[in-house]
Amino acid sequence: MNLVFDIGNSSSKMAVYDGRTKIAFFRTKEFSFEKLHKKMSKYHIDKAIVCSVKDIPEFIIDIFKTNYPVVHFLSHESKLPFSIDYETPETLGPDRIAAVAGAYAEFPGKDVFIIDAGTAITYEFLSENIYRGGNISPGLNMRFKALNRFTGKLPLVSPADNYTSPGRNTNDAIMAGVVTGITYEINEYIRAFEKKHTDFKVVLTGGDSEYLKNKIEHNFTWLPDIVVSGLNFILEYNA
């Protein structure tokens, strides 16, 4: 069995695969040694992959190297089924690589535009089996926090489904401004790609994708865990 461990900015995800079939999935804000051991003790893990957007805690490195025969730490130097056309590959987040790998596995031979709506929103483009680069902008909650932190009186709000637009009160004004801004941004990105490219797939993923998916006006495929599936694909590819 394969163990996939994705350490993100806001939460961490762990999945167990039998080949390409996901048989278990966990998400948490923080993993401890005890929690990891309890979750994994009932599975016979043959190989594992770790992806992290921040420094990996030493206890996690020790657990993986001690308990699993094969451990792969994803980086730009990993063996991939596509090439990376990026001026600074050493600065390319492994989660972005994993998202592209997931899209590659899901739509083999296709051009794919991947929108990952997480802590940050990333826009990645895979064309002719080459990762062509991507863009990064602030995510939903980052925008809410920025308005609160960098102003004197604006409150901190959280995503909600019901609000007035134009806002009839300050909370709704913030909500409408942030959500409408992100929605316009995503829709315009897709529209701009449609002008330059034909026959490409759009993938929406990430922690905020479920909240945003009904606000997008274009055809897309919702794959909320494409980073996790991409990590498993990379692990199988390297094996």
Image (tube, rainbow, N blue to C red):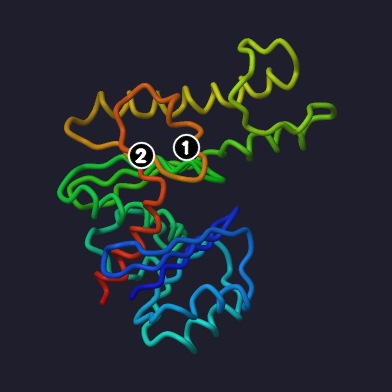
Query: Residue 210's mark?
Result: 1
Indicate the amino acid at tag 1. Answer: Glu
The image quarter containing residue 84 is bottom left
Residue at point 47%, 87% (across, down) = 67
Number of disc labels: 2
Quadrant showing the N terminus: bottom left
Say which element carries label 2. strand
Horizontal side of 179 relative to 100 (left or right) equals: right
Which residue sits at x=37%, y=57%? Answer: 97
Q: Residue at x 25, y 37 (%)?
A: 201
What amino acid is found at the position of numbered circle 2 in the picture? Trp
Q: Nearer the viewer, residue 43 or 56?
A: 43
Q: Position of residue 29 (x, y in %)?
A: 63, 58
Q: Earlier in the sequence, mark 1 or mark 2?
A: 1
The residue most toward the front is 42
Q: Are marks 1 and 2 in contact (CB under 8 Å)?
A: yes
Residue 72 in picture, x, y percent from top left: 39, 76
Residue 93: x and y in percent read 46, 58
Q: Marks 1 and 2, Cα distance to the nearest angstrom?
A: 8 Å
Along the horizontal axis of the image, is 113 left or right of 199?
A: right
Residue 222: assigned label? 2
